[in-house]
Image: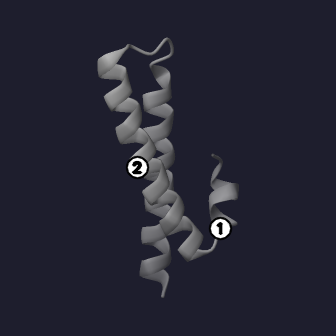
Amino acid sequence: MKISEIKGLTTDELKERIETEVANYGQMKFNHTISPLQDTSQFKKLRRDIARMKGELRQRELNK
């Protein structure tokens, strides 16, 4: 997810999206322990997307 897409979301949508992605990341890790994924770079991409969203959310909180 690009930063421009993240900035286009409302704060409530952003919070909801973060919760969804964190749950998705946990499920992906669990599935990886059972049967390894072919492309493990998905972990890195998902972690970075979550970090971008959390960073934008924090920035919005500080600017209020």
The circle on residue 22 is 2
User: Looking at numbered disc 1 in the image, what kind of residue is underneath it?
Assistant: Leu
Q: Would you place residue 32 above or below residue 30 in this image?
A: above
Mark count: 2
Q: Position of residue 10 (x, y in %)?
A: 62, 74
Considering the numbered disc 1 on the image, is that residue within a helix, a strand or a loop? loop
Q: Which sits earlier in the primary sequence, circle 1 or circle 2?
A: 1
Residue located 44% across and 19% down the image: 40
Check the image and tell me how it is coloured: one colour
The image shows residue 17 at horizontal and vertical percentages of 53, 59
- The residue under the point 65% across, 48% down is 2
Asked if 12 appears above or below 28 in the picture, the reply is: below
Residue 29 is left or right of residue 18, and the answer is: left
Disc 2 residue type (three-letter): Val
Q: Residue at x 69, y 57 (%)?
A: 4
Q: Nearer the viewer, residue 37 or 60?
A: 37
* Rendered image: mark on residue 9: 1
Q: x, y percentage for residue 56?
A: 51, 64
